[in-house]
Image (cartoon, grey):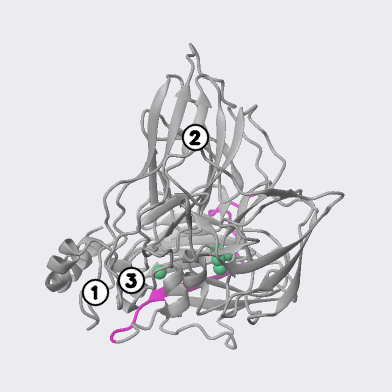
């Protein structure tokens, strides 16, 4: 893709003035203005992996109170980071298809918040998965999410979605996993959650604030955590199989994961099983995305799970002074600690059930009722005007209007010099074609990384759930800056 390269190069030239200070000042850049300059240090590393408390539904219902408040322990330190019910991540919610999830959200933050069930195929109306609600400080709100009986089993998550505060709150620690049970269990010796987040903390455990340049780029924290722990050790016995539910809850960081000495066998993507397992040397997870992988160690030893640098482009200078770069050093996220000895790996299944039927194949005539084009745009100057189709988010404006029941094809283009992960609430989509020629498939998903200067073609079937919701960039700083738009599905 030459256009991308040319664009990147001119952007690099623009940024050259800031390069020296970026190279010299690798510490604490995320703080922007008012940086303490110190690098976040964990209090503890290499401890055995821990998981948040699991709350499971009973007789078709899971009812709980989630209190969002500061003051959780992270990476072995007391911090003023944010948590749900005193933890970051918050409790894991285990549901079955057909269940009702009732959450009383209590806001003990000093700013408004709300709750979004990322990837769940549930109604966006009223007290459902409604991103337009605002729960004020000191207030509480009763949510109710009704999962359809044919909801795909898989890995989803929850996080705040109050426009203007999303990046600060998710970066601050507010996130938790949702597991919809069902489907094959792979006879796994362990079924683990690896919720991967990043954060920057100062010496007294306060979360560092992001300045305007870091927001335009999309802030990345100095500490990459798994279930709130720093570089945890994941125990395994040689010859057995583990299932890892990977969730990228980082505000902006694209994870480019590899496990030393192993391939990752991917069985699902964004909570939906693939038709067959896919062996990968590397798994790229954009912010918001999930993947379930099987890990089958054979030999004892320690193997690092590493995220490698991923260049997601650069917003340019925009008169804001030096802007940081997105490419960092490889970072160890966790370590697999294999004990014992085995002569053979546990067997793998050859096929997997498809949990939701994919939309009709792209070449089938008459399968698409409507087409539309949507473009990620960035204006020039202060604030950079992050948006879609030249407009910043306005909750009162309806950007896409369509009738319930249609299958649509959306061409999502990216006219900017940065990659943006496109995310649509409620209605999962199929990626049928991309500008890079890769990344397509029969499986539905809810996040796709649209490369700088590139495009993706999606199919979305709006077969159920009338209502109003949003699509946005899942670099949450961009979303807060206005890279979000509304969709109204009418019955
Ligand atoms: Cu996880 Cu609207 O996002
Ligand atoms: Cu979402
Ligand atoms: Cu973006």
Q: Secondary structure at mark 3?
A: helix
State the residue in front, 20 or 327: 20
* Residue 466 position (above or below residue 379): above
CA separation, marks 2 and 3? 31 Å
Q: Position of residue 302 (x, y in %)?
A: 39, 28
Using the rendered view, name the quadrant where residue 51 is placed: top right
Q: Which label belongs to residue 31?
A: 3
Label 1 – label 2 distance at C-alpha: 40 Å
Residue 67 shown left or right of residue 102 in the figure: left
Q: Is residue 415 visible?
A: no
Give the spatial CA distance, label 3 vs label 1.
18 Å
Viewer-proximal residue among 207 and 385: 207
* Tag shown at residue 266: none
Q: Quadrant of the C terminus?
A: bottom right
Residue at left 54%, top 78%? 163
Q: Secondary structure at mark 1?
A: loop
Local secondary structure at mark 2: strand
At 30% across and 77% down in the image, what residue appears? 34
Q: Name the disc covering residue 316, or none.
A: 1
Residue 344 is one of the magenta-drawn residues = no
| Residue 406 picture quarter | bottom right
Number of the label disc, if any, that sits on residue 234: 2
Give the mark nearest the N terminus, 3 or 1.
3
Mark 1 residue CB less than 8 A from any atom of ligand 3: no
Magenta segment boundaries in residue numbering? 357-381
Residues at circles 2 and 3 in contact by the CB criterion of under 8 Å? no
Position in image of residue 52 (x %, y %): 61, 49
């Amino acid at each position: 893709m030459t256009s991308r390269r040319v664009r990147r190069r001119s952007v690099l030239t623009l940024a050259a003035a800031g390069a020296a200070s970026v190279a010299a000042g690798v510490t604490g850049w995320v703080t922007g203005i008012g940086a303490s300059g110190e690098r976040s240090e964990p209090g503890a590393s290499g401890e055995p992996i821990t998981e948040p408390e699991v709350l499971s539904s009973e007789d078709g219902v899971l009812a709980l109170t989630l209190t969002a408040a500061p003051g959780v322990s992270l990476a072995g330190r007391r911090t003023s980071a944010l948590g749900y019910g005193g933890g970051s991540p918050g409790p894991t919610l285990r549901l079955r298809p057909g269940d009702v999830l009732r959450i009383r959200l209590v806001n003990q933050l000093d700013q408004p918040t709300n709750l979004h069930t990322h990837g769940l195929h549930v109604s966006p109306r009223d007290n459902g998965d409604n991103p337009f609600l605002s729960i004020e400080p000191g207030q509480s709100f009763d949510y109710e999410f009704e999962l359809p009986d044919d909801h795909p089993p898989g890995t989803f998550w929850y996080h705040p979605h109050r426009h203007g505060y999303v990046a600060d709150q998710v970066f601050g620690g507010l996130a938790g996993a949702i597991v919809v049970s069902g489907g094959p269990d792979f006879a796994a010796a362990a079924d683990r959650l690896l919720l991967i987040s990043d954060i920057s903390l100062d010496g007294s455990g306060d979360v560092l604030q992001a300045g305007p340049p870091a927001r335009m780029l999309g802030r990345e924290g100095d500490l990459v955590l798994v279930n709130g722990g720093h570089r945890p050790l994941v125990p395994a016995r040689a010859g057995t199989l583990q299932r890892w539910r990977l969730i990228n809850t980082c505000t902006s960081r694209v994870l480019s994961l590899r496990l030393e000495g192993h391939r990752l066998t991917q069985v699902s993507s964004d909570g939906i099983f693939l038709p067959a397992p896919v062996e990968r040397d590397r798994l790229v997870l954009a912010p918001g995305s999930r993947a379930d992988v099987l890990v089958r160690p054979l030999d004892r030893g320690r193997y690092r799970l590493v995220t490698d640098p991923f260049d997601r482009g650069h917003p340019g200078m925009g008169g804001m002074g030096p802007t940081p770069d997105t490419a960092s050093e490889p970072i160890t996220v966790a370590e697999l600690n294999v004990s014992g000895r085995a002569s053979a790996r546990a067997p793998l299944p050859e096929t997997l059930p498809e949990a939701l039927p994919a939309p009709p194949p792209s070449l089938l005539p008459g399968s698409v009722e409507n087409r539309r084009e949507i473009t990620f745009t960035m204006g020039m100057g202060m604030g950079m005007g992050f948006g879609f189709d030249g407009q910043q988010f306005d909750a009162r404006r309806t950007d896409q209007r369509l009738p319930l029941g249609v299958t649509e094809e959306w061409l999502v283009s990216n006219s900017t010099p940065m990659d943006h992960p496109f995310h649509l609430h409620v209605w999962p989509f199929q990626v049928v074609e991309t500008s890079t020629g890769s990344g397509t498939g029969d499986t539905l998903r809810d996040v796709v990384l649209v490369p700088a200067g590139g495009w993706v073609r999606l199919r979305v079937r709006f077969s159920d759930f009338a209502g109003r919701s949003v699509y946005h960039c899942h670099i949450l700083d961009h979303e807060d800056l206005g890279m979000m738009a509304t969709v109204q599905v009418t019955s």
